[in-house]
Image: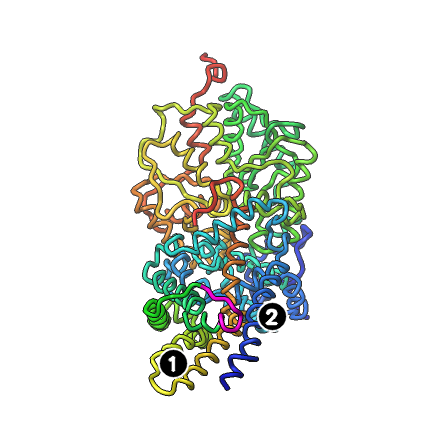
Amino acid sequence: MYDFVTGPLAWIAFLIFFIGLIARTVWYFKGLNWQLDRVAYRPHMRYGIKGAVRSIGFWLFPYGSRSWRNNPVFTFLVFLFHIGLLITPVFLLGHNIMLKSSWGFSLPTLSETTADILTIAVIVSALFLVLRRVSLNEVRIITTAYDYLLIAIAVAPFVTGLMARYQVSNYQFWLIVHILCGEILLIAIPLTKLSHFILFFTSRAQLGMDYGIKRGGMKGKGFAW
Amino acid sequence: MSEGKLCNKKTVDTVEQLHALLADKSGKQYYEEMNHLEIDDKALWGTIQKTFKSRLKTWLDICSHCGLCAESCFYYLANDRDPTQVPSYKIQQTLGELIRRKGKVDNAFMQMCMDTAYSKCTCCTRCGVYCPFGIDTGIMFSYLRGLLFSQGFTPWEMKIGTGMHRIYRAQMDVTSEDWVDTCEWMAEEYEEDWPGLTIPVDVENADIIYTVNAREPKHYPEDLAEAAILFHLAGENWTVPSEGWEETSLAMFAGDWAACKMQVESVYAAMERLKPKSMVVTECGHAYRATVIEGPYWAGIKSGQTPVPSFHYVEWVAEALRTGKLKIDPAKKIKEPVTYQDSCNYIRNGGLGDFAREIMSYIAEDFREMTPCREHNFCCGGGGGLNGIGRYRAQRNIGLKIKRDQILATGAKLVVSPCHNCWDAIRDMEEIYKIGIRWSFLKPLLISMVEVPEHMKVAEQ
C-alpha cells in the first residue's frame, strides 16, 4: 500500500496538480476578451502590468489593502492559515528527505518545532474560520457544504500528519492516510474552488489591468487598494 | 412565444413605439404584460455561451464565500445588515443560478433577477475593491442587466430610455434642432451680462468640443449658459457639435449594448467631423463613464480610447484653475464647511479623485472629506439608473441613508456634486430626510467666485 500511494498515486496527484494549474492559467488568459471585458489589454500592456502588479501586491501582504485592514482578525487568520498551508509541506524535513532520496535534491528545511507550530496554526486558524462561517450572518448565508468540504480537504493532511508524527497509534496507518489526504488536496487544488491557488493571481491581475488601463490607471497615481 | 404589446423582447426604434410606452402611465400595463412574458431559453443560453467568458466565470466559480463584500455594499449597511443584501449572495442567487440552470428559468425568476439587479445594486463596483479575489459584482450585475434586457425584463423607464437613445441619440426627446435652438437661446439670454458670449456650434478644429447630458438642454439650459460663460472667461477656443452632443447612456444602465454603441458612435462621429483637439464632458458621472471609459469598447476601437483625448469637466476646471485661465477672487471663496461627493463613475472608475481635491483647494476654505472618500466612496444611492425608476423608489430611498449619514458626519451643509445622478440623489435625500443641506454643481459656484477681467465686464451705464 505504501509503495502504491508513494509511487503511482503520487505521480498521478502531482501530474494533475501541475498540469491542472497550467491548464487553469492558460484557460483563464485565453478566455480574456478585450471587447467583452472592455479592457484594451494589448495596446496598453505597460499600464496593464503595472496595474496587475499593484493589484496583486497590495493584497498579497497582510494589511496591504483597505479590506484587509478593515478586518484585522480575519486577515490574521487567513494569512496564518495560508502561510502554514504553503510553507509547511514544501519545507518539511520529512518531505525533503523523500525528495532527496527520489530526485537527488532537497530544499531548505524547517526545524521540527517550527513545522509543528505551523501545522497547529493551520488547524487552529481553520477552526476559527469555520466558527466565523457559522456565527456571522453575512458569511453563514453564503456558506455551503462545499465550503466546509474544501476546508476539510485542505486541513486533513495536517491533522493526519500530526497523528503520524506523534504516533498516537499505528504509525503506518496514519502515514498512509496522511499521504492519501495530501494527494487528495493536490488533486483538488486545480479541480475545485481551491484553484484560487493560481486564479487568485490571475483574477487580481485582470482587475488590476482593468483599473490600470481603463478605470483611471492612465490618469491617476494608480488605484489605492 | 407570448409577447406583450409594450413589454416584449423587441427594442424601441420608432416614435410610435416610444409614445405607446410613454402613454402607459407608470408602466402599469407594461409590468402587467411582463408577468406573462415568456423566456426564450435557447437564445438566452446562446448569448451566455458567447459572452460568459473566463473573467466572469472565474468570478462566479472561485468566490470563497468569505463575506468581505458585505460591508462594502451600501445596501447591506443601509438595510441593517440584512444578509440577503450581501453582494456574493445577490449575484449567486441570480446570475449564478441562471448559469447553473443553463438559462432554463421561469418568468418569476427573471423578475426576481430584474428586481435584484436594479433595486439591490447600483453597479457602483465598490465590492470589487474589497474582495480579495477582485470579484466585481457590480460588473456582473451590469452583465446580468444585459441578459435581462435581451429577454424583455427591464424596468419601464429603462425601456423608454433605450428607445430615446435609439431614436434621438439622446436620453430624452431632444432633437438636433432643439439642441441648437437651446444653444442660440442661451447665448442670447446671457449675452447682455457677458458681452461677447457665444455658444459656437460646429466649429472645426476647435481646442475643445463640449458635450453634455440631455437633461441640461431639456430641463436646465442655464447649465449650458454657465459652461459657455466659464469657457468665455477662460478664453477657450471651443465648440459644441450640432449632432453627437449627448454623452449619457441609459442604455448602459439597461444593458442595451447595441444602443450603447449607437449612442457613443454619434459622439465619435462628431469628433471625426469637427476634428477638435480634445473633448470636455459636462458634470456628469455616468456620461463620462459611458462615452469616454466604456464607449470605445462598444464602438470596437481597439485602443480603448476615444478618437480625441477626452476629459471630464473636473479635469478641465482643475487645469483652468492651475494655469490661471480662471482666477478665483479670494474674498469669494466658500467660507462655510463644504464637502465633495465622489461620483463612482469618474472617481472610482475613472481615477479622477485628485482633480476634485485640486479644485476644492482653490475654491473652499473649509473643505471636509467624507469618510470613506475617493476610490472608496459610497454610491450616492441613485446610481445605475435607480433615480429614474419608479418601481424601486422605496428601496432607493432606504439606500440614501448611507450618504446622508456620511454628509452629516462632515458637519458641512453644502455638498459639491459634479454628477447629475449624485446631484439628484442628494436633492431627493434632502426632500425625504430634511437634513438642511444644499448641493451644487461646480459651474454656478465657480461663476459666483471667479474674477472677471475688465474687458469682459458689462460697461457701466
Q: Which residues are magenta?
A: A99-107
For the residue carrying disc 1, how many other residues have a C-alpha within 10 Å: few (<14), some (14-19), or many (20+)? Answer: many
Looking at the rendered structure, the kind of residue marked 1 is Ala
Q: Is residue B343 above or below residue A141?
A: above
Residue B295 spot, x, y in % from top left: 61, 46
**Residue B200, quarter of picture:** top right
Residue A164: mark in rendering: 1
- Circles 2 and 1: CB atoms closer than 8 Å: no
Residue B423 spot, x, y in % from top left: 44, 43
**Residue B460, quarter of picture:** top left
Tell me which chain the residue with mark 1 is part of.
A
* Closest to the observer, B25 or B456: B456
Residue highlighted by disc 2: B36
The verdict on residue B441 being magenta is: no
**Residue B243, quarter of picture:** top right
- Residue located at (51% from left, 48% from top): A51
* Closest to the observer, B444 or B125: B125
Residue B380 spot, x, y in % from top left: 42, 49
